Image: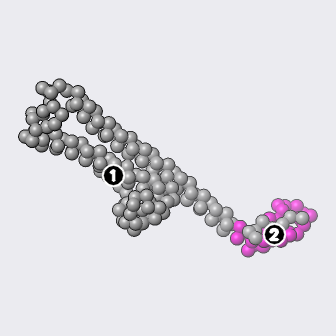
Amino acid sequence: MATCEGPGCGKRLPAPRARGGRPRRFCSERCRARHRRLMAKIGRNTDRREVRLEDADERRHEMRSAAYTVASAARRVAAELDAEAERPDYRQPAGWHGSRLAVSASWYLAGRYTAAALDVLDEVHRLVASAVAADRAAGADWAAIGDALGVSADTASRRYRELPTDAGR
């Protein structure tokens, strides 16, 4: 004997009719409606989960791209410093004396180094924003993100709620 497929019902269904036709799956219209609502809810949750997973994949890709950009900027600064260190003393900027720079030309290197470091810092800020977006897409709450950043959940939320991932580019 078949039982009702309605959620939580389990009543026995009457025997199939002699005339034929499709066998009954539900004991009443109420059980059929409950089953239909449950299946619709499962479908909506599955759709939301798939969207969330796709968003998480996209955010991880953005984060990976930002990490490569940070690494590239840092390598660029390191390469410039290496090239400068390998130049002979007579090819160094004015004011260069051995391993230190005289006061008169310090503005030249300090400004250049600071600008290069700020470029790397900008890329790091983009990386952190991408990481927060990836964590949020993966389902992390603001408290966990705030703990990782060393700030409160409210501060993390205010700082990173609107995440322009590529706005500065």
Q: Give me the C-alpha separation between circle 2 and circle 1.
A: 57 Å
**x and y percentages locating residue 36 in the rendered image:** 69, 66
Q: Amino acid at mark 1?
A: His
Which numbered tag is attached to residue 26? none
Q: Is residue 19 above or below residue 120?
A: below
In the picture, measured across the screen, residue 64 lies left or right of residue 17, that is left
Rate crowding at label 1 as few (under 14), some (14 to 19) or many (20 or more) other CA atoms within 10 Å.
few
Nearer-the-camera pick, 159 or 43: 159
Q: Amino acid at mark 2?
A: Gly
Q: Is residue 43 above or below residue 73?
A: below
Query: What residue sits right under mark 1 in the picture?
Result: 125
Magenta: main secondary structure: loop
Q: Earlier in the sequence, mark 2 or mark 1?
A: 2
Q: Residue at x 84, y 62 (%)?
A: 23
Answer with the quarter of the image where residue 107 lies: top left
**x and y percentages locating residue 31 in the rendered image:** 75, 71
Let me know if residue 99 is in the magenta part.
no
**x and y percentages locating residue 110 in the rendered image:** 17, 43
Rate crowding at label 2 as few (under 14), some (14 to 19) or many (20 or more) other CA atoms within 10 Å.
some
Q: Quick one: which residue is furthest to the right in this view?
A: 18
Q: Is residue 63 above or below residue 20?
A: above
The answer to whether residue 93 shows anywhere in this view is: no
Question: Considering the image in quadrants, where does the N terminus appear?
Answer: bottom right
Labels 2, 1: front one? 1
State the count of labels. Answer: 2
User: What sort of colour scheme is used for the picture?
Assistant: one colour
Query: What residue sits right under mark 2 in the picture?
Result: 10
Answer with the quarter of the image where residue 77 lies: top left
Q: Residue at x 86, y 70 (%)?
A: 12
The answer to whether residue 60 shows anywhere in this view is: yes
Q: Residue at x 67, y 63 (%)?
A: 39
Q: Which residues are magenta?
A: 9-35
